[in-house]
Image: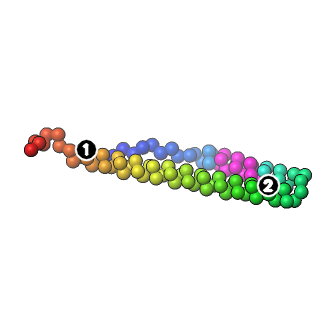
Amino acid sequence: MSTPNQSKNTNAFFLQAGVSFGIALLTMVVAVLYLPVDPWIRAFLGLGTLFLTTSSFTLAKCVRDAQENQYVVSRLDQARVDKLLAEHDPFRAIS
């Protein structure tokens, strides 16, 4: 049974993604803290940033789970086809 190629991220790509996320979040927090507005507006923007960050993690997890489920389903389908092909005898007489 052949397995589909799974793309695996390199350590450098993983590091770059983590660093860029950290920089983006840090700059957003600093911008909200130093924004010359009332404290309630700053708090509102801070909560919005927190909600957007947690929602991003949740969305990434859902996408990853959906891809993993699709991979398992395709492997099961391939196993079924392989089993049918292994059991098929083209020279068997049809009665």
Task: Return the x and y of residue 93 as percentages of the image width and height.
Answer: 10, 42
Quickly name the residue at label 1. 85
Does the stretch in magenta take in 27?
no
Q: Residues within 10 Å of mark 2 (few under 14, many from 20)?
A: some
* Magenta-drawn segment: 15-26
Q: Residues within 10 Å of mark 1 (few under 14, many from 20)?
A: few
Quickly name the residue at label 2. 45
Left or right: 50, with 30 as reference point = left
Q: Identify which residue is drawn at 45% across, 49% down.
A: 70
The one of 95 and 4 positioned closer to us in this rendering: 95
Q: Secondary structure at mark 2?
A: helix
Q: Mark 2 or mark 1, which is nearer to you?
A: 2
Q: Amino acid at mark 1?
A: Leu
Task: Return the x and y of residue 28 as percentages of the image width and height.
Answer: 78, 51
Q: Identify which residue is drawn at 90% across, 52% down.
A: 36
Does the stretch in magenta take in 23?
yes
Left or right: 87, with 78 as reference point = left
